[in-house]
Image (tube, rainbow, N blue to C red):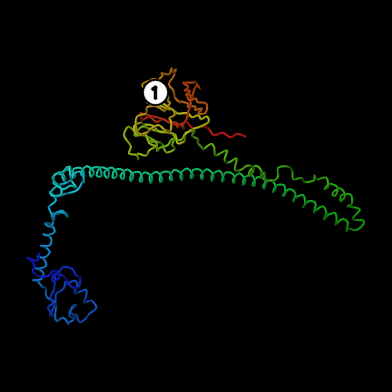
Amino acid sequence: MAAAFPCAEDDFLCSICSNVFNNPVLLSCSHSFCKDCLELWWVDKPLHPCPLCRAPSTGEPHRNLALKNLCDSFLKQLSLEDKTSETETVCSLHSEKLRLFCLDHQQPVCVVCRDSRAHTNHRFRPIDEAADDYKEELRKHLKLLQDRIEHFNKVKVEWDQTAAHIKTQALDTERQIREKFQRLRKFLEEEEKARVASVKREEKQKSAEMKTKIQALSREIASLSETIKATETELKSGSVTFMLNYKAAVERAKQRPLVEDPQLGPGALMVVAKHLGNLSFNVWKKMKEMVTYFPVVLDPNTAGPYLSVSEDLKSLTNEGEEIVKPQNPERFQMYPMVLGSEGFKSGTHSWDVKVRSDAHWSVGVIAESVWRKGTLQTGYWEVWYDNGKYKVSCPPKIDNILSVNQPLKRVRVKLDWSGGKLSFYDSDTNTLLHTFRQTFTERLFPFVNSFNSNPLSIVTKKVTIQF
């Protein structure tokens, strides 16, 4: 660089920004600066002095084209030197070029190092050949990292979809909750109106009855008042007149006490107990007619490909084409299967599934530990239907064909976990189809499996009240 540019490097630097001149301008005092640097330095200096010698500037600064060309050439030379300045590193011990690579010490060496005692019986490679080998090894590690980041990017896309799915789930769940509570509110509002109307009807009836009684009593009071007034008048009359009218006055006075004594009679008041007694209980008892209860609630987070679960979580349908869903650990990847939301690890449980004779289906229970991302080998017990045949299955045991007199419409699954018994019934005839006897050791989940577009559903149970 010294041969190409006899000037010192500082001669190419602006004294304001200390960088190579950018669009240099020349002042009347012969000093040069970057145009932008000078204008910024002059912002609060109306006399425009030189930043170096403080001499006032006369006129507008002129572009220093000669300095600009020198700076451009200087920068170009620096760029070329950066590209060609890959210095050949020499051995720190022998000042010889490092042309070999010691495989035992894993370091570059020179030819003198190779013959030294420090590298006796060591293996060497030409440094370019060793670099090629190690570059290839590094490429393998790089490929692993690239594959990993590609995998991570795919996972991120799936997780982004999962986050969007969670948002959709939340909005849909909130909507359904609001709809259900709206129906409950509507029922309660209508029930409130009906009961208030009943109170008003009774009030109107009882008030009308009391009004009739009061009017009759008022007429009787008026009549008695007239009799009293006439009798008092007779008592004030003279003796002759009194005696002439005495007999009639006595008869008139004697007749009034014969009127029956007015009685209120039973049932005159509002029957408050009828309206308020056990009010909340009676409303709840009536409300049970609009409430449904499913002994098994399907979990849409477990539903396999092609399956859609109804909003009330009681039925499933095979749509015939794959539905994009998050691949969460709970979901079945290969089977059109959905589990109940609750597993059982004790006690006795029973539920009915409405099935069809024009669909390929299976119902039963499956162990919690069964791997849901591959082929099911064992850990489940089922009754299934295909091509007109009913079978029971419990791998690895051989399937048994069931003898069924008429097509099944509802299958009852009865699990006695503690007793180690799982039974299947024809719900309509209460006929036992098959019983598995097994010592259960882990939580079991109800499942329904469907290969057909015709829906299968959990049968609701009637809500009863016992005292």
Residue at x-position 38% and y-position 20%? 388
Q: Which residue is mark 1?
A: 396
Disc 1: CA contacts within 10 A as few (<14), some (14-19) or many (>=20): few
Q: Secondary structure at mark 1?
A: loop
Going by the numbered disc 1, the residue's amino acid type is Pro
Q: Residue furthest front?
A: 117
Find residue 343 and report its horizontal and vertical position in percent: 47, 34
Residue at x-position 89% and y-position 49%? 247
Find residue 403 and report its horizontal and vertical position in percent: 43, 17
Choose top left, top right, bottom left or bottom right for residue 263.
top right
Residue at x-position 38% and y-position 36%? 331
Choose top left, top right, bottom left or bottom right for residue 162.
top left
Q: Is residue 26 above or below residue 163?
A: below
Q: How many marks?
A: 1
Foreground residue, 6 or 392? 6
Find residue 251 and report its horizontal and vertical position in percent: 86, 48
